[in-house]
Amino acid sequence: MDPPLPPGPATAEQVILPHLDAAYNLARWLVRDPVLAEDAVQDAAVRALSYFASFKGGDARAWLLRIVRNSALSLLAARRQGAAASLDDGATEHSEIADTADDPEAALHRREGYARLDEALAALPAELRECLVLHELEELSYKQVAEITGVPIGTVMSRLWRARRALFGQQAGGDLP
Amino acid sequence: MNDDTCAEMRLLVQADVDGELSPREAAAVAVHLDHCPSCATLQAQLIGLSGRIRQEVPYHKAPDSLRAAVLSRVAAAAQPANDNPLPRWRRLPRLGLGPMLPIGGGFAVAACLALLLLVPRGGGLPEAVVSDHIRALQPGHLMDVVSTDQHTVKPWFDGRLDFAPPVKDFKAEGFPLAGGRLDYLAGRPVAALIYQRRQHLIDVYVWPDDGRSGRGPDSGSRSGYNFVHWSEGGMTFWAVSDLGAGELEDFVRLWRAG
C-alpha cells in the first residue's frame, strides 16, 4: 500500500512526511482533542528526528505510529496528572477531565448507547480504540497493530473482538453473540 | 455446534473478515459457517460493522499548520547541528484560537513557522525553491486543492494567503493547471500552482515582491531541475520543473503573455 522507499538510506523526511495524516489521525483518536493531537504529533516528530538513527528501514509508517502512540499516551498521562493536582487544590471545575472512558469495565458496561458510531468509538477504552482505528481506518494488519501497540498478535485479536462487541452493544443493532 | 466451539470460532471468523487467514484456514472457517447459522450471522455483522466504520468514522487528516510545523522541524534537523540556532525541542507557540479558527489560526501559526524554516545556508533562493519542489513530489504532499479549474483554485488561495496570486490555465497550449497548495519559502507563506506537461510537473511559486527576494539568476538548474525566475505586477515568480529548459522557457513565455 505504501510507495516503496527509494533505494539507499531513507531520510527522515521520507519516513515522516508521507505518514503525517496517519500520525495525526491516530493521535486525534487517542487524545480526542485537536490541539492536543497536534502537540502529540509535534512531540513525536521531535522524537522521531532524534531517534532516527534507530530506524533500520522497513515499515516506516509502523515505526512512526509507534512513536506517535507513545507521545500521545505521555501527553494524556501528563494531563491527567495535572487534573488530579488541581483537584487536590480544591478546584472542582476540572473534574470533567477525569477520564472515565479509560476505565474498561465502566465503558464496557455503559449501556445508554450512542446514536453515532464515531461517538461510540470515541467512548471505547483507549487500548480497544487504538486497535480498531489502526486496523479499520489505517488498514494495518494484526502484525503491524501488534508492533505499534507493543502487544502479542493474540492480544490484538481479542482487543479487536472486545472493541467490536462493545460497539455493537452500544448501537441499536444489538449484541454480537 | 456447541457453544464452546463457537467461542473458539469467533476469533477465527473475525480474522477471516479481517483478511488475516491463510487460504487453508479460511476454507476451514467456510466449512464451519455452512453448518453454523450463529457464526454465519456473526460474519455478516462483522462485515457490516467494518463497512460502517469506514463510512461513518472520520479520518482526521493532518491540518496545514501541523504539516508546516513538522516540515520546518525536519528541514531544521537536516541542517548541520551548529548551523541551527533553535534547539530541536523548542515548542512552538500555540494559538488558543487554532481549533476554532482553522484557517485564520492555522495561517497565523504558519506565518510564525515560516520564520523557522531556514533557507539553506550556502545556497540561495534557487536551492530553496528546487528543494521545495522535490519535497512536494513526496506522496500526499503535492496538492492541497486538486482542480483543473482556475476559478476553483483562485478562491481556495483567497482564504489562506494575505495576497491574491494570479491563477492562469494553459490547457489549450498543453500545460493544464493541475492544482495548488500552500508552501513556505523565503520566510513567508507562498502560493504554489501545479501544472502538468505530459508526465512532468511544473511548480510555479508566487509571492509579493517585497524587495528582499534577491536578484539571483533569472534561470538555471540545480540538482537536475530547471528554474526560471521573474517579477511582474509586484509579485515574484519561480517556475521549477524537471522539464527541459527550453520547454520551461516556453511555459514562462506563455504565462507572461497570458
Image: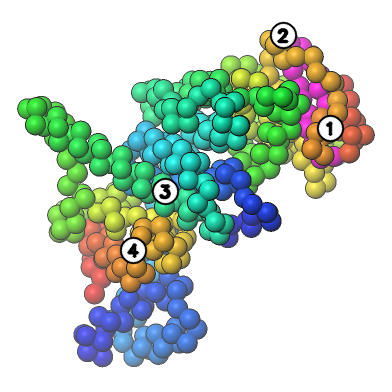
In this picture, which residue range is highlighted in magenta? Answer: B228-243
Q: Residues within 10 Å of mark 3 (few under 14, many from 20)?
A: many
CA gap between label 2 and label 1 equals: 23 Å
What residue is disc 4 on?
A151
Q: Residues within 10 Å of mark 1 (few under 14, many from 20)?
A: some
Residue at horizontal 69 percent and vertical 56 percent from the top: A7
Q: Amino acid at mark 1?
A: Ser
Q: Which mark is residue B221?
A: 1
CA gap between label 2 and label 4 equals: 57 Å
What residue is disc 3 on?
A67
Q: Amino acid at mark 2?
A: Gly
Is there one chain holding both mark 3 and mark 2? no
Q: Quadrant of residue B128?
A: top right
Is there one chain holding both mark 2 and mark 4? no
Q: Is residue B73 magenta?
A: no
Residue at horizontal 25 percent and vertical 38 percent from the top: A78
